[in-house]
Amino acid sequence: MMKTSFAVAAVAMTVAAGAAIAADLPRSQAPYYNAPAPNTYNWTGPYVGGNLGYQWGSTTHNPTNPSGLEGGLQAGYNWQSGQFVFGGETDIQISGADDTFAPWKFSNPWFGTLRGRAGVALNNILFYGTFGLAYGGVKGEVAGLAESKSHIGWTAGGGMEVGLTPNWSAKAEYLYIDLSDRNYSVTGAANGVESNILRFGVNYRF
């Protein structure tokens, strides 16, 4: 009986000691796994939108400085590789920019651009530069005589676009546009329009 009690006590002490040692041992770490990447804004794909802004500038070889409100539509496509975003955009604008000085009046009733864009995205914020072709109409008037011509030139600028939802974004953009000189009989000179444009817009991407 004594031997049996001793054996039981020995087994109990061994189990208790084992449990105490196990409790003192450091716990193993949870199995390693890859945490899901944080959500990032996707700039890739086609988009369309509208814009509204202000245009101011000067007429070459003439004292007039056309200025006024402008607005229009744009469409484009973006490709994204990591933080870098590349794309192309075209737009067509209606403008109220005009100016009268002495007998001359010049206006730029419409213009458009075809540009490349490249920038860096910080998640849903895109900073970009842009450069490309510009074209538009210029109208010269002197003493009741009017002459309109289509001009081709170039444009460059930059801006910032902010993704508001996966589909909607808003942007602020500056462009410099140079519509190259053409000869006007009403002024007897080669005239063109150089403009600064600051505009704000929204885009919807598909």
Image (cartoon, helix red, strand yellow):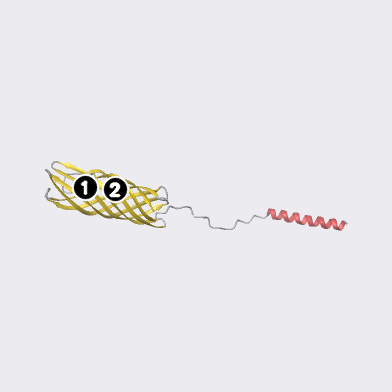
Quadrant including the N terminus: bottom right
Amino acid residing under circle 1: Asn
Q: Is residue 199 above or below residue 34?
A: above
Image spot of residue 48 (x, y percent): 34, 51
Residue nearest the viewer, comparing 108 with 159: 108
The circle drawn on residue 108 is 1
Residue nearest the viewer, comparing 167 with 34: 167
Residue to which mark 2 is pinned: 72
Relative horizontal placement of residue 167, taking residue 11 as reference (left or right)? left
Relative horizontal placement of residue 138, taking residue 92 as reference (left or right)? left
Callout in the foreground (1, 2): 2
Relative horizontal placement of residue 194, taking residue 73 as reference (left or right)? left
| Residue displayed at 27% across by 47% down | 197
Mark earlier in primary sequence (1, 2): 2
Image spot of residue 51 (x, y percent): 31, 47
How would you rate the neighbour count of disc 1 (Cα within 10 Å): few for under 14, some for 14-19, many for 20 or more?
many
Residue nearest the viewer, comparing 9 with 101: 101
Image spot of residue 90 (x, y percent): 30, 54
Residue nearest the viewer, comparing 90 with 127: 90
Secondary structure of residue under mark 1: strand
Secondary structure of residue under mark 2: strand
